[in-house]
Image (spheres, coloured by chain):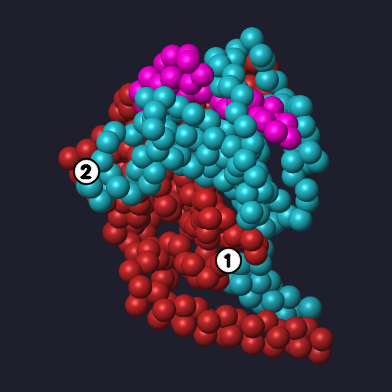
Amino acid sequence: MKTLQHLLFFLTMLISFHCKEERKEEAAEKKPVSSDTISNLVPEVPGGNSYAQVDISPMDMSYFPVDYPKIKMANSAAPPALARVVYSRPHLQRRRLFAGILKYDEPWRLGANESTEIELYKDATIQGKKVKAGRYIMYCIPHQDAWTIIFNNNIDTWGLKQDPAKDVERFRVPATSGNPPLEYFTIVFEKTGMGADLIIGWDDILVKMPMSF
Amino acid sequence: MKKAPIVFAALIMLGYTASSQTSLPEIDKSPLDMCYYPSEYPQLKTQAKSIEPAVARVIYSRPKKEGRPVFGNLVEYGKLWRLGANEATEIEFFKPVVIGQKKIAKGRYTLYAIVNEKSWTFILNKDVDIWGSFKYKQANDVVRVEVPVQTMKDQVESLAMTFDKSPSGINLMVAWENVKTELPITL
Protein backbone atom coordinates (compact mmCIF):
# COMPACT_ATOMS: atom_id res chain seq x y z
CA MET A 1 0.00 0.00 0.00
CA LYS A 2 2.86 2.28 0.88
CA THR A 3 4.47 1.63 -2.50
CA LEU A 4 1.23 2.56 -4.20
CA GLN A 5 1.10 5.81 -2.23
CA HIS A 6 4.65 6.58 -3.30
CA LEU A 7 3.82 5.82 -6.88
CA LEU A 8 0.78 8.13 -6.80
CA PHE A 9 2.91 10.84 -5.27
CA PHE A 10 5.53 10.55 -8.01
CA LEU A 11 2.89 10.48 -10.73
CA THR A 12 1.33 13.65 -9.32
CA MET A 13 4.76 15.26 -9.22
CA LEU A 14 5.41 14.13 -12.74
CA ILE A 15 2.16 15.62 -14.03
CA SER A 16 2.74 18.90 -12.22
CA PHE A 17 6.27 19.13 -13.62
CA HIS A 18 4.95 18.52 -17.10
CA CYS A 19 2.47 21.36 -16.67
CA LYS A 20 5.25 23.66 -15.53
CA GLU A 21 7.35 22.64 -18.47
CA GLU A 22 4.59 23.50 -20.91
CA ARG A 23 4.22 26.93 -19.34
CA LYS A 24 7.98 27.44 -19.63
CA GLU A 25 7.94 26.53 -23.30
CA GLU A 26 5.08 28.94 -23.94
CA ALA A 27 7.08 31.69 -22.29
CA ALA A 28 10.12 30.73 -24.32
CA GLU A 29 8.18 31.08 -27.56
CA LYS A 30 7.57 34.74 -26.91
CA LYS A 31 11.22 35.54 -26.40
CA PRO A 32 13.90 34.65 -28.95
CA VAL A 33 15.82 32.58 -26.43
CA SER A 34 17.84 29.54 -27.39
CA SER A 35 16.22 26.33 -26.32
CA ASP A 36 19.36 24.94 -24.69
CA THR A 37 19.35 27.48 -21.87
CA ILE A 38 16.28 28.60 -19.97
CA SER A 39 16.49 31.48 -17.59
CA ASN A 40 14.29 30.34 -14.73
CA LEU A 41 17.19 30.04 -12.32
CA VAL A 42 18.58 32.85 -10.25
CA PRO A 43 22.18 31.77 -9.78
CA GLU A 44 23.26 34.73 -7.66
CA VAL A 45 22.22 35.18 -4.04
CA PRO A 46 21.01 38.66 -3.07
CA GLY A 47 23.81 41.16 -3.41
CA GLY A 48 24.06 40.39 -7.09
CA ASN A 49 27.03 41.14 -9.25
CA SER A 50 27.10 44.35 -11.22
CA TYR A 51 30.41 43.43 -12.83
CA ALA A 52 29.87 40.00 -14.29
CA GLN A 53 26.72 38.00 -13.62
CA VAL A 54 27.20 34.31 -12.98
CA ASP A 55 26.02 32.32 -15.99
CA ILE A 56 22.98 30.05 -15.85
CA SER A 57 24.90 27.52 -17.94
CA PRO A 58 28.27 27.52 -16.23
CA MET A 59 31.47 27.18 -18.20
CA ASP A 60 33.79 24.25 -17.68
CA MET A 61 36.92 22.81 -19.22
CA SER A 62 38.16 19.29 -19.94
CA TYR A 63 41.73 18.38 -20.72
CA PHE A 64 43.40 15.39 -22.30
CA PRO A 65 45.23 13.74 -20.63
CA VAL A 66 42.24 13.70 -18.27
CA ASP A 67 42.73 16.10 -15.34
CA TYR A 68 45.95 17.36 -16.89
CA PRO A 69 46.21 20.47 -14.64
CA LYS A 70 46.29 18.14 -11.62
CA ILE A 71 48.85 15.88 -13.33
CA LYS A 72 51.05 18.91 -13.94
CA MET A 73 50.54 20.08 -10.38
CA ALA A 74 51.79 16.70 -9.13
CA ASN A 75 54.66 16.55 -11.63
CA SER A 76 55.99 19.71 -13.21
CA ALA A 77 58.02 17.59 -15.65
CA ALA A 78 54.86 15.97 -17.09
CA PRO A 79 54.79 16.03 -20.92
CA PRO A 80 52.58 18.80 -22.32
CA ALA A 81 48.80 18.50 -22.57
CA LEU A 82 47.37 17.22 -25.87
CA ALA A 83 43.93 18.81 -26.02
CA ARG A 84 41.46 20.97 -24.14
CA VAL A 85 37.77 21.76 -24.52
CA VAL A 86 36.23 24.90 -23.01
CA TYR A 87 32.44 24.81 -23.10
CA SER A 88 29.33 25.92 -21.27
CA ARG A 89 27.00 23.43 -19.66
CA PRO A 90 23.26 23.92 -20.13
CA HIS A 91 21.02 21.69 -18.02
CA LEU A 92 17.88 19.73 -18.70
CA GLN A 93 15.77 21.28 -15.95
CA ARG A 94 13.14 18.58 -16.29
CA ARG A 95 13.09 18.65 -20.08
CA ARG A 96 14.17 15.86 -22.41
CA LEU A 97 16.90 16.49 -24.95
CA PHE A 98 14.96 15.70 -28.09
CA ALA A 99 11.66 17.02 -26.77
CA GLY A 100 12.09 20.76 -26.59
CA ILE A 101 15.85 21.31 -26.63
CA LEU A 102 17.45 19.87 -29.76
CA LYS A 103 16.00 18.82 -33.09
CA TYR A 104 17.41 16.13 -35.31
CA ASP A 105 19.28 17.40 -38.36
CA GLU A 106 19.49 20.97 -37.03
CA PRO A 107 22.89 22.40 -36.12
CA TRP A 108 23.55 22.97 -32.44
CA ARG A 109 26.27 24.98 -30.75
CA LEU A 110 27.34 22.09 -28.50
CA GLY A 111 27.03 24.16 -25.36
CA ALA A 112 25.85 27.67 -24.49
CA ASN A 113 27.10 31.26 -24.48
CA GLU A 114 30.62 31.53 -25.94
CA SER A 115 31.15 29.07 -28.79
CA THR A 116 32.53 25.75 -27.61
CA GLU A 117 36.26 25.71 -28.16
CA ILE A 118 38.56 22.76 -28.75
CA GLU A 119 42.27 23.32 -28.67
CA LEU A 120 44.72 20.77 -30.00
CA TYR A 121 48.16 21.28 -28.49
CA LYS A 122 49.57 19.04 -31.23
CA ASP A 123 48.26 17.63 -34.49
CA ALA A 124 45.54 15.02 -34.05
CA THR A 125 44.07 12.38 -36.32
CA ILE A 126 40.33 11.81 -36.42
CA GLN A 127 38.79 9.23 -38.75
CA GLY A 128 42.03 9.13 -40.71
CA LYS A 129 42.06 12.90 -41.24
CA LYS A 130 44.82 15.03 -39.82
CA VAL A 131 43.66 18.06 -37.83
CA LYS A 132 46.40 20.61 -37.20
CA ALA A 133 47.31 21.88 -33.75
CA GLY A 134 45.40 25.05 -32.88
CA ARG A 135 42.15 26.47 -31.57
CA TYR A 136 38.83 25.68 -33.22
CA ILE A 137 35.19 26.10 -32.39
CA MET A 138 33.17 22.94 -32.42
CA TYR A 139 29.49 22.51 -33.23
CA CYS A 140 27.32 19.61 -34.24
CA ILE A 141 24.38 18.36 -36.25
CA PRO A 142 22.62 15.65 -34.25
CA HIS A 143 20.91 12.78 -36.05
CA GLN A 144 19.13 9.82 -34.55
CA ASP A 145 22.02 7.34 -34.52
CA ALA A 146 24.97 9.58 -35.34
CA TRP A 147 26.09 13.15 -34.78
CA THR A 148 28.15 15.22 -37.16
CA ILE A 149 30.87 17.02 -35.23
CA ILE A 150 32.25 20.06 -37.00
CA PHE A 151 35.54 21.86 -36.39
CA ASN A 152 35.43 25.48 -37.55
CA ASN A 153 37.96 28.32 -37.68
CA ASN A 154 35.66 31.14 -36.55
CA ILE A 155 37.08 31.25 -33.02
CA ASP A 156 36.27 33.70 -30.20
CA THR A 157 32.62 33.82 -31.23
CA TRP A 158 29.28 33.44 -29.50
CA GLY A 159 26.69 30.70 -29.89
CA LEU A 160 26.52 29.43 -33.43
CA LYS A 161 26.30 31.57 -36.51
CA GLN A 162 27.18 29.00 -39.11
CA ASP A 163 29.92 29.96 -41.51
CA PRO A 164 30.56 26.78 -43.52
CA ALA A 165 33.36 28.55 -45.42
CA LYS A 166 35.32 28.35 -42.17
CA ASP A 167 34.56 24.68 -41.49
CA VAL A 168 37.78 22.71 -41.20
CA GLU A 169 36.51 19.15 -40.93
CA ARG A 170 33.28 17.24 -40.33
CA PHE A 171 33.16 13.89 -38.59
CA ARG A 172 30.09 11.69 -38.47
CA VAL A 173 30.35 9.69 -35.25
CA PRO A 174 27.94 7.22 -33.62
CA ALA A 175 25.43 8.31 -30.98
CA THR A 176 23.77 5.95 -28.55
CA SER A 177 20.63 6.46 -26.47
CA GLY A 178 19.45 4.79 -23.27
CA ASN A 179 22.59 5.69 -21.32
CA PRO A 180 22.31 6.80 -17.66
CA PRO A 181 20.83 10.30 -17.89
CA LEU A 182 23.02 13.39 -17.45
CA GLU A 183 21.37 16.53 -16.12
CA TYR A 184 24.18 18.80 -17.33
CA PHE A 185 25.60 18.79 -20.84
CA THR A 186 29.03 17.15 -20.62
CA ILE A 187 32.14 17.04 -22.79
CA VAL A 188 35.06 15.02 -21.56
CA PHE A 189 38.00 13.03 -22.91
CA GLU A 190 38.42 9.35 -22.11
CA LYS A 191 41.73 7.58 -22.63
CA THR A 192 41.74 4.80 -25.22
CA GLY A 193 44.40 2.49 -26.64
CA MET A 194 44.93 4.75 -29.65
CA GLY A 195 44.52 8.12 -27.92
CA ALA A 196 41.25 9.44 -26.60
CA ASP A 197 37.53 9.39 -27.17
CA LEU A 198 35.93 12.78 -27.05
CA ILE A 199 32.75 11.99 -25.13
CA ILE A 200 29.74 14.22 -25.61
CA GLY A 201 26.82 13.43 -23.35
CA TRP A 202 23.50 14.94 -22.41
CA ASP A 203 20.31 13.33 -21.16
CA ASP A 204 20.61 9.66 -22.20
CA ILE A 205 22.55 10.39 -25.40
CA LEU A 206 26.24 9.61 -25.62
CA VAL A 207 28.43 10.48 -28.61
CA LYS A 208 32.01 9.25 -28.93
CA MET A 209 34.59 10.64 -31.30
CA PRO A 210 37.86 8.67 -31.33
CA MET A 211 41.02 10.75 -31.68
CA SER A 212 44.69 9.91 -31.83
CA PHE A 213 47.67 12.18 -31.27
CA MET B 1 7.92 -4.02 -4.03
CA LYS B 2 6.93 -4.89 -7.59
CA LYS B 3 6.23 -1.21 -8.12
CA ALA B 4 9.82 -0.29 -7.38
CA PRO B 5 10.98 -0.34 -11.02
CA ILE B 6 8.17 2.04 -11.95
CA VAL B 7 9.09 4.41 -9.13
CA PHE B 8 12.68 4.19 -10.29
CA ALA B 9 11.63 5.02 -13.83
CA ALA B 10 9.67 8.00 -12.55
CA LEU B 11 12.76 9.16 -10.69
CA ILE B 12 14.84 8.92 -13.84
CA MET B 13 12.24 10.92 -15.75
CA LEU B 14 12.41 13.59 -13.09
CA GLY B 15 16.15 13.73 -13.49
CA TYR B 16 16.68 12.96 -9.81
CA THR B 17 19.34 10.38 -10.54
CA ALA B 18 21.45 12.75 -12.60
CA SER B 19 23.65 13.64 -9.66
CA SER B 20 24.58 10.04 -8.96
CA GLN B 21 26.37 9.71 -12.29
CA THR B 22 29.33 7.52 -13.24
CA SER B 23 32.70 9.20 -13.70
CA LEU B 24 31.51 12.07 -15.86
CA PRO B 25 32.20 15.43 -14.23
CA GLU B 26 29.71 17.16 -11.97
CA ILE B 27 29.12 20.88 -12.16
CA ASP B 28 31.84 22.80 -10.35
CA LYS B 29 30.94 24.59 -7.15
CA SER B 30 32.88 27.58 -8.43
CA PRO B 31 31.91 27.73 -12.10
CA LEU B 32 34.37 28.66 -14.80
CA ASP B 33 33.84 31.87 -16.77
CA MET B 34 35.71 33.97 -19.29
CA CYS B 35 36.05 37.62 -20.17
CA TYR B 36 37.55 39.31 -23.22
CA TYR B 37 38.87 42.67 -24.20
CA PRO B 38 37.11 44.17 -26.07
CA SER B 39 34.29 43.30 -23.65
CA GLU B 40 31.72 40.96 -25.15
CA TYR B 41 34.11 40.34 -28.04
CA PRO B 42 32.52 36.99 -29.01
CA GLN B 43 29.05 38.54 -29.28
CA LEU B 44 30.34 41.51 -31.26
CA LYS B 45 32.33 39.30 -33.61
CA THR B 46 29.34 37.01 -34.13
CA GLN B 47 27.09 39.97 -34.91
CA ALA B 48 29.76 41.10 -37.42
CA LYS B 49 29.99 44.50 -35.70
CA SER B 50 33.13 46.40 -36.57
CA ILE B 51 35.41 46.07 -33.59
CA GLU B 52 39.07 46.18 -32.78
CA PRO B 53 40.78 42.79 -32.73
CA ALA B 54 40.69 40.76 -29.51
CA VAL B 55 43.47 41.83 -27.15
CA ALA B 56 43.11 39.58 -24.14
CA ARG B 57 41.04 36.82 -22.58
CA VAL B 58 40.83 35.61 -19.00
CA ILE B 59 39.50 32.18 -18.03
CA TYR B 60 38.86 31.89 -14.30
CA SER B 61 36.69 30.09 -11.79
CA ARG B 62 34.28 32.05 -9.66
CA PRO B 63 34.15 31.12 -5.98
CA LYS B 64 31.22 32.51 -3.99
CA LYS B 65 31.33 34.45 -0.74
CA GLU B 66 28.41 32.48 0.75
CA GLY B 67 28.29 34.58 3.87
CA ARG B 68 31.97 34.14 4.70
CA PRO B 69 34.35 37.03 5.26
CA VAL B 70 36.67 36.82 2.23
CA PHE B 71 39.69 39.10 2.44
CA GLY B 72 41.83 38.62 5.53
CA ASN B 73 40.02 35.36 6.20
CA LEU B 74 39.16 33.03 3.31
CA VAL B 75 41.91 34.77 1.33
CA GLU B 76 44.68 35.34 3.86
CA TYR B 77 46.64 38.57 3.79
CA GLY B 78 50.24 38.32 2.65
CA LYS B 79 49.84 34.87 1.09
CA LEU B 80 49.71 33.79 -2.52
CA TRP B 81 46.14 33.45 -3.81
CA ARG B 82 45.16 31.68 -7.01
CA LEU B 83 42.75 34.46 -7.92
CA GLY B 84 39.96 32.01 -8.55
CA ALA B 85 39.42 28.31 -7.93
CA ASN B 86 40.18 24.95 -9.53
CA GLU B 87 42.36 25.32 -12.64
CA ALA B 88 44.83 28.20 -12.26
CA THR B 89 43.45 31.48 -13.59
CA GLU B 90 44.64 31.96 -17.16
CA ILE B 91 45.22 35.19 -19.07
CA GLU B 92 45.95 35.13 -22.77
CA PHE B 93 47.23 38.06 -24.79
CA PHE B 94 46.49 37.95 -28.52
CA LYS B 95 49.12 40.63 -29.14
CA PRO B 96 52.15 41.89 -27.18
CA VAL B 97 51.31 44.20 -24.25
CA VAL B 98 53.16 46.02 -21.50
CA ILE B 99 52.56 45.34 -17.81
CA GLY B 100 54.56 47.13 -15.12
CA GLN B 101 56.88 48.56 -17.77
CA LYS B 102 57.71 45.06 -18.93
CA LYS B 103 57.06 43.87 -22.46
CA ILE B 104 54.85 40.81 -22.38
CA ALA B 105 54.93 38.56 -25.44
CA LYS B 106 51.67 37.40 -26.95
CA GLY B 107 50.61 34.08 -25.44
CA ARG B 108 49.13 32.38 -22.44
CA TYR B 109 50.05 32.96 -18.78
CA THR B 110 48.70 32.16 -15.34
CA LEU B 111 47.68 34.96 -13.01
CA TYR B 112 47.98 34.98 -9.23
CA ALA B 113 47.86 37.64 -6.52
CA ILE B 114 49.28 38.34 -3.10
CA VAL B 115 46.48 40.11 -1.30
CA ASN B 116 46.98 42.69 1.44
CA GLU B 117 44.59 45.07 3.12
CA LYS B 118 45.72 48.16 1.22
CA SER B 119 47.36 46.67 -1.87
CA TRP B 120 47.52 43.61 -4.06
CA THR B 121 50.50 42.26 -5.97
CA PHE B 122 49.44 40.73 -9.28
CA ILE B 123 51.75 38.00 -10.54
CA LEU B 124 52.00 36.88 -14.16
CA ASN B 125 53.60 33.43 -14.40
CA LYS B 126 54.67 31.12 -17.24
CA ASP B 127 53.34 27.81 -15.86
CA VAL B 128 50.09 27.19 -17.74
CA ASP B 129 47.61 24.27 -17.79
CA ILE B 130 48.06 23.76 -14.07
CA TRP B 131 45.76 23.45 -11.06
CA GLY B 132 45.51 26.11 -8.35
CA SER B 133 48.61 27.78 -6.94
CA PHE B 134 49.90 24.81 -4.98
CA LYS B 135 52.99 24.33 -7.14
CA TYR B 136 53.57 27.99 -7.93
CA LYS B 137 57.23 28.69 -8.74
CA GLN B 138 58.46 32.22 -8.36
CA ALA B 139 61.30 31.38 -10.79
CA ASN B 140 58.69 31.25 -13.56
CA ASP B 141 57.27 34.71 -12.86
CA VAL B 142 57.09 37.06 -15.81
CA VAL B 143 56.18 40.21 -13.92
CA ARG B 144 54.82 41.38 -10.56
CA VAL B 145 52.80 44.59 -10.17
CA GLU B 146 51.56 46.15 -6.95
CA VAL B 147 48.26 48.00 -7.16
CA PRO B 148 46.11 49.79 -4.57
CA VAL B 149 42.90 48.29 -3.19
CA GLN B 150 39.69 50.19 -3.78
CA THR B 151 36.75 49.70 -1.44
CA MET B 152 33.25 49.44 -2.87
CA LYS B 153 29.89 50.19 -1.28
CA ASP B 154 28.28 47.11 -2.77
CA GLN B 155 29.12 43.51 -2.01
CA VAL B 156 30.03 41.21 -4.88
CA GLU B 157 28.95 37.62 -4.16
CA SER B 158 30.96 35.77 -6.82
CA LEU B 159 34.52 36.68 -7.74
CA ALA B 160 34.25 38.82 -10.88
CA MET B 161 36.70 39.93 -13.56
CA THR B 162 36.19 42.24 -16.48
CA PHE B 163 38.29 44.44 -18.76
CA ASP B 164 37.81 48.22 -18.93
CA LYS B 165 39.35 50.75 -21.27
CA SER B 166 41.93 53.06 -19.69
CA PRO B 167 43.82 56.10 -21.01
CA SER B 168 46.93 54.00 -21.67
CA GLY B 169 45.25 50.77 -22.71
CA ILE B 170 43.08 48.52 -20.59
CA ASN B 171 42.59 47.50 -16.98
CA LEU B 172 41.76 44.02 -15.79
CA MET B 173 39.30 44.74 -13.01
CA VAL B 174 38.96 42.14 -10.25
CA ALA B 175 36.15 42.44 -7.69
CA TRP B 176 34.97 40.31 -4.78
CA GLU B 177 33.31 41.12 -1.47
CA ASN B 178 33.67 44.91 -1.18
CA VAL B 179 37.15 45.04 -2.72
CA LYS B 180 38.13 46.04 -6.22
CA THR B 181 41.55 46.22 -7.86
CA GLU B 182 42.77 47.00 -11.34
CA LEU B 183 45.74 45.55 -13.18
CA PRO B 184 46.88 48.13 -15.74
CA ILE B 185 47.80 46.75 -19.16
CA THR B 186 49.38 49.14 -21.65
CA LEU B 187 48.73 48.61 -25.33
Q: What count of labels does the image hold? A: 2
Residue hosting label 2: B50
Query: How far across and how far down the image is residue B151, in percent?
Result: 65, 45
Is A18 rendered above or below residue B152? below
Label placed on residue A42: 1
Q: Which callout, 1 or 2, points to the residue nearer the camera? A: 2
Which chain is home to disc 2? B
In magenta segment, residue B97: yes
Instruction: Give the colour chain A carries in the figure.
Output: red
Instruction: Considering the whole magenta stretch, tell me its main secondary structure.
Output: strand
Q: Residue at x 51, y 51 (%)?
A: A52
The residue sitting at the left extreme is A165
User: Which secondary structure, mark 2?
Assistant: loop
Q: Residue at x 27, y 36 (%)?
A: B52
- Amino acid of disc 2: Ser
Instruction: Give the colour chain B carries in the figure.
Output: cyan
Give the image quarter of residue B154: bottom right
Local crowd size for mark 1, using a 10 Å CA cut-off: few (<14), some (14–19), many (≥20):
few
Query: How far across and how far down the image is residue A182, in percent?
Result: 57, 57
> Do marks 1 and 2 share a subunit?
no
User: Which secondary structure, mark 1?
Assistant: loop
Q: Residue at x 73, y 31 (%)?
A: B116
